[in-house]
Amino acid sequence: MTVALPLWFEIGSFVVLLLILAFDLLIIFKRPHIPSPKESALWVTFYIALALLFALLMLLIGDAEHAGQFLAGWLTEYSLSIDNLFVFVIIMARFQVPRKYQQEVLMVGIILALIFRGVFILLGAGLIASFSSIFYLFGAFLLWTAFNQAFRSHDDEGEQDSWFIRFARKHLKVSSQYEGNHLRTTVDGRRMFTPLIIVFLALGTTDLLFALDSIPAIFGITQSPFIVFTANVFALMGLRQLYFLLGHLLDKLVYLKYGIAFILAFIGVKLIFHAMHENELPFINGGQHIEWAPDISTWTSLAVIVGAMLVATIASLVKLRMSGTSVAEAIHGDDPEEVEAENAAADGTQEDPRT
């Protein structure tokens, strides 16, 4: 493991990213509301521009290789984060979370995702430093994940309670109604949790599963823990705004999961080739390096990732258009008057009729 960039740049980057996340969190809890498409679009554009600016700084301060690794890693994690949104939508609908509080719930989900991914990054970096042959396992795992991604429905992931959620439901005293964004409430003189605790647990277990997929994927692009972590942070920043921007379009992007599956399969093959190229296992080729195994470059990976996402997105939009539904109709599935009423209720100017 080598330091990809100057230490002052890495430390400064962590400080700035934490300040941005803290500012974003403060806005949510100070004024809970449903972001308008314009507001969401501006924030998403800001975070994308920030990631591109960060890549430019890496190019100027470091080199093209590290900048390319960041871009490829960021796009991979961004596509997997969008995939994560599908399950978030199912969880929100299943537990009937009021839309005016979904921003807070999403932010908690994003924070949990950062924590879990941070832990797995440290574990992954340690494993790679100690066992170079771990790439065989990472590659096989990604190929299995790609198969599941292509042939398993997102509904299966979000609509069935895991054993952990069933255990929590059984052993925690949970009320039947939400109390704003509070985790605790009093019912008939008894202190109880609100349903929000179950939602947070469901998001947390989902984040844990997605971290298991995403970390081996990005380690197939770069072995720098700094680039791995910053790519994950930038991929998760703006995710909640993207949730409200895409709206009902999320479940209309029917071919997106195949694009993501192709990316995971490609990185899985790349990891196996890398493991073969650096092979030290005595029962494979007598413990010698397999010289014919290709070493796929960062820029080839970047081209494949961008191409797969473009093809999947365009194909989904073409199918959507052929079905007679416009993109605008898919995004703005909510009744504008209902959204306005919920925002007014969140600001305290009127009562939300849905709560």
Image (cartoon, grey):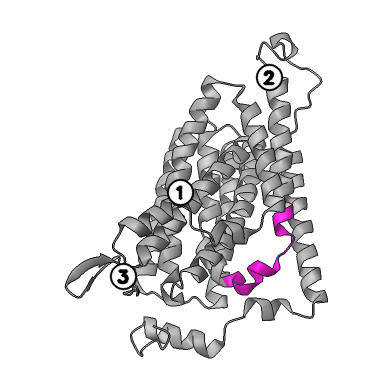
Which residue is drawn at the image coordinates 48% and 57% (left, top)? 161
Which residue in the protein does label 3 denote? Answer: 175
Q: Which mark is residue 278?
A: 2
The alpha-carbon separation of the residues under discs 1 and 2 comes to 31 Å
Q: Position of residue 142 (x, y in %)?
A: 65, 39
How many other residues sit within 10 Å of disc 3, few (<14), some (14-19) or many (≥20)? some
Amino acid, disc 1: Leu
Amino acid, disc 2: Glu
Camera-side residue of 141 and 308: 141
Q: Position of residue 240 (x, y in %)?
A: 51, 64
The alpha-carbon separation of the residues under discs 3 and 2 comes to 56 Å
The alpha-carbon separation of the residues under discs 1 and 3 comes to 29 Å
Which residue is drawn at the image coordinates 58% and 31% (left, top)? 223
Q: Secondary structure at mark 1?
A: helix
Q: Nearer the viewer, mark 1 or mark 3?
A: 3
Q: Which quadrant of the figure has residue 128?
A: top right
Q: Which residues are magenta?
A: 245-258
Q: Secondary structure at mark 2?
A: loop
Residues at discs 1 and 3 in contact (Cβ within 8 Å): no
Q: Is residue 251 shown above or below 172?
A: below
Which residue in the protein does label 1 denote? Answer: 114
Q: Nearer the viewer, mark 3 or mark 2?
A: 3
